[in-house]
Structures are given as structure tokens and as C-alpha cells.
Image: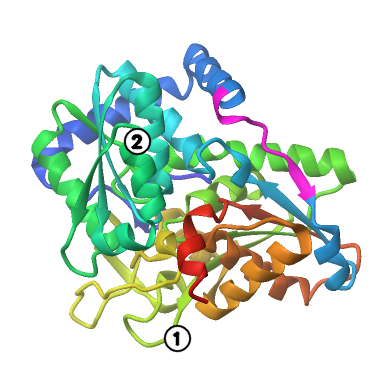
């Protein structure tokens, strides 16, 4: 997606205190260099192949397709990456950049814990000191990932402010970065935050779409009619959509519809939000009439965020992609259905994408191809899912 000076249309930009501008400008310059550096790209590609396990397979969900009247549903299996989700794609790219810039300390925010685990994993590989900020509520419901991060050597700092979820973890990380930006690199986990982070994360995640496009053409000889992914901040969706933006492929994003449309009961910033500025960017936000950020809520900790990446705000505004709110209950039902029809237990975030794919498939004809990004696996959610 084309952008100019860190903006996608009216969305994006860099809204930060002056104390952080030198750090951001330095990262912007360094990223502009490495994205065209053959040696950097070779090293990242080698790590993706030998450490992450790329390319991830494309799997045809035939059992599910039969239940949907013959729609050919394909799953891009990002859940099979090392660490269990798409997050490692972006983390390895940012950590290689940080190392080239001379940083030995990194920090990150995390919601569901997958970005935190990926950052802790990469930091262990590269011998870096790692600090992860995580909302205390998310630490309770994603305890397995907390233990994984600690085993990998990361220091996990509980954030007890506000709703104690991803929004507050991000605010805590930004505060720490502001105080330590001279010797610490901030590894942002999604296509959010000040420029150049949205563009940078999209660049590192675009491997998902490139692989999927090549695989589906090799497998079927044609492009899919539609492509679906879940959207919190939106990195896995940005990675999938990137390769299809110029193709006649329908793009769908599944937001967190939560418990209902009431303020504080969902995380659907695109379908129920308004433009505003938050955490370094202009984007679509859940806010009240005075611009105060509203709490977000979702059964999926990774979608529990009151904003979204500026790329997605632009894709919605221009009509290039369609975003719909998927309720907690719809996600739970899709989680159970995929588990029992295909033997694949998805992350609750990914289950939102599967749920939307089921809705979209109802509008398709037999033989139409629907591509779904399965962004992560569901191990981390098992304790909470057991309650349902």
C-alpha cells in the first residue's frame, strides 16, 4: 500500500513528545537502508527458513468446505511458525535492525502474549536484554505465555493501570522507551504507533501474503475470490492483504465484536470508532465525545485494543477492504468448529477470522476460493476456553 511521509491517506503520522523524535528518526533512517540491503534481507530470509520454519504451508480445509456447500477454503498456517504465531516474522526483522543499529536492550508490549514470547525468543537468540510490558489482566488469562517469556529470560512487567490489557501495556512500554530510548529499542508488535513502525511491521509481515499468493496459484492456478484475517492492531491482516492489494481479491478483516455494541463491551475500532490521535498515530479509535479513549473488551486478548493500524483505517475509508465485528460467541463457535472438523485448534484471535470466513462463505458459490490467515495456535487459550 502506497504511503507518503508516514501517512496512509489521512491516517498515520508521528505524534510523539520531542524527547522521542531523535529515536524515531534514527529508526526511520536505518529501516530505509536495510529494507533495500541484500545482505540484511538474506540474513532475515535465512532465519525465516531455518529458525522460524518458513514457508508455512497452505492447507485446504476440505471437511469444512463440504459443510459450506463446496466453497474451497484454504488456511495459511501461521500457527505452525516457531513460537506459534505470525509475530516472529516481524520480531526477527526488528531485532536484526536493532542489532545493526548497535542496541543490546529491547522492550515490547504484549496482549495475548504471542508478541512477547516472540520478542523474548528472538532476544535470547541474539543475546539481548529483554523487557516485556503486559497488562495484569492479560497475565492472568495468558499465564502460559508469561511463563514462556520468563523461561526465555525476559523480564515481564505487570501493568495495573486502566483496563490492565494491551492498551495499558502499550502505554507503559512507551513511557519506558521515552526514558531509555538512547540504549533501548522498542519492538512494536503490530502495524500501529508512530511512523515508521506501521510501514516497518507491514514490510516484515508481508512474507505471509507473498507466500500465500504463490502457493494458491501453484495449487489451484487462480487467485482466491476473498482473503480473510482477524484485526486487532492488524499486523497479520496487513501481511496477508499486502500481496493482494492490486488484485481483484475481496479483503475482509474480523474485529472484536466482544459482548455487544455497547461502549466498553467490544474492540471494534473500525466499525464502531471515530478518527483520533493515540499512541503516536492518527487512526480509528474507540473514544467518547470528548476524545477520551474508551476501554476495549474481547475474549481474545490480542484483539483487546481500542485502536487499529492506520493502514486498515485507510483501506476501510477507501473501500478496498471490508471490516466486520465478530462477537465473542461467534468466535467461540468457530474455534470449536475448526477444532472438530479439521483437527486444528486456533488461537481465539484467529477464530474471529474463521468466524468471519464462515459468514463470507455463505455468500460464495461452490468452487469459489476463500483464503483465511490462521495467525496463531490455541495452546495459550486453553485454560480460558475450558471455562466455556
Dot 1: few (<14), some (14–19), or many (≥20) neighbours within 10 Å?
Answer: some
Above or below, 170 relative to 37: below
Look at 50% across and 11% down and name the residue there: 39
Q: Which residue is mark 1?
A: 260
Q: Nearer the viewer, mark 1 or mark 2?
A: 2
Q: Mark 2, residues whose alpha carbon is within 10 Å: few (<14), some, or many (≥20)?
A: few
- The first of marks 1 and 2 along the sequence is 2
Quarter-of-image position of residue 95: top left
- Residue placed at 28% from the left, 19% from the top? 101
Q: Residue at x 38, y 66 (%)?
A: 304
Which residue occupies 35% across, 45% down? 147
In depth, the one of 6 and 200 nearer the eye is 200
For this view, does 189 lie left or right of residue 59?
Answer: left
Total number of numbered labels? 2
357 with respect to 301 (left or right): right
Say which mark, if any, is on residue 151. 2
| Residue 297 locus on image (x, y percent) | 37, 73
Amino acid at each position: 500500500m502506497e504511503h507518503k511521509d508516514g501517512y496512509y491517506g489521512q491516517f498515520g503520522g508521528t505524534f510523539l513528545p520531542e524527547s522521542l523524535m531523535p529515536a524515531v528518526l534514527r529508526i526511520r533512517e536505518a529501516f530505509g537502508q536495510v529494507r533495500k540491503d541484500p545482505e540484511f534481507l538474506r540474513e532475515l530470509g535465512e532465519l525465516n527458513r531455518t529458525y522460524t520454519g518458513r514457508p508455512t504451508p497452505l492447507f485446504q480445509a476440505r471437511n469444512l468446505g463440504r459443510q459450506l456447500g463446496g466453497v474451497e477454503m484454504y488456511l495459511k498456517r501461521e500457527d505452525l511458525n516457531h513460537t506459534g504465531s505470525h509475530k516472529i516474522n516481524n520480531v526477527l526483522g526488528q531485532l536484526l535492525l536493532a542489532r545493526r543499529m548497535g542496541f543490546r536492550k529491547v522492550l515490547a508490549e504484549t496482549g495475548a502474549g504471542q508478541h512477547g514470547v516472540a520478542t523474548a525468543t528472538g532476544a535470547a537468540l541474539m543475546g539481548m536484554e529483554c523487557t516485556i510490558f503486559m497488562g495484569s489482566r492479560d497475565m492472568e488469562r495468558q499465564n502460559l505465555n508469561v511463563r514462556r517469556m520468563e523461561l526465555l529470560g525476559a523480564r515481564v512487567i505487570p501493568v495495573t493501570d486502566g483496563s490492565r490489557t494491551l492498551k495499558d501495556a502499550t502505554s507503559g512500554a512507551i513511557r519506558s522507551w521515552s526514558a531509555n530510548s538512547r540504549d533501548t529499542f522498542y519492538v512494536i508488535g503490530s502495524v500501529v504507533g508512530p511512523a515508521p513502525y506501521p510501514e516497518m511491521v507491514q514490510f516484515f509481515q508481508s512474507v505471509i501474503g507473498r507466500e500465500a499468493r504463490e502457493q494458491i496459484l501453484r495449487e489451484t492456478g487462480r487467485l482466491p475470490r476473498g482473503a480473510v484475517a482477524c484485526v486487532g492492531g492488524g499486523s497479520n491482516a496487513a501481511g496477508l492483504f499486502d500481496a493482494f492489494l492490486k488484485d481483484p481479491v475481496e479483503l475482509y478483516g474480523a474485529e472484536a465484536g466482544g459482548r455487544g455494541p455497547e461502549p466498553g463491551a467490544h474492540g471494534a475500532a473500525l466499525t464502531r470508532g471515530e478518527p483520533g490521535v493515540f499512541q503516536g498515530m492518527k487512526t480509528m479509535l474507540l473514544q467518547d465525545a470528548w476524545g477520551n479513549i474508551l476501554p476495549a473488551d474481547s475474549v481474545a486478548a490480542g484483539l483487546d485494543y481500542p485502536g487499529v493500524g492506520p493502514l486498515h483505517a485507510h483501506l476501510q475509508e477507501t473501500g478496498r477492504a471490508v471490516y466486520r465485528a465478530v462477537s465473542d460467541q461467534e468466535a467461540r463457535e468457530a474455534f470449536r468448529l475448526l477444532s472438530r472438523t479439521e483437527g486444528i485448534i486456533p488461537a481465539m484471535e484467529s477464530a474471529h477470522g474463521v468466524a468471519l470466513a464462515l459468514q463470507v462463505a455463505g455468500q460464495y458459490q461452490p468452487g469459489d476460493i476463500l483464503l483465511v490467515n490462521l495467525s496463531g495456535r490455541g495452546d495459550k487459550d486453553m485454560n480460558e476456553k475450558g471455562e466455556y
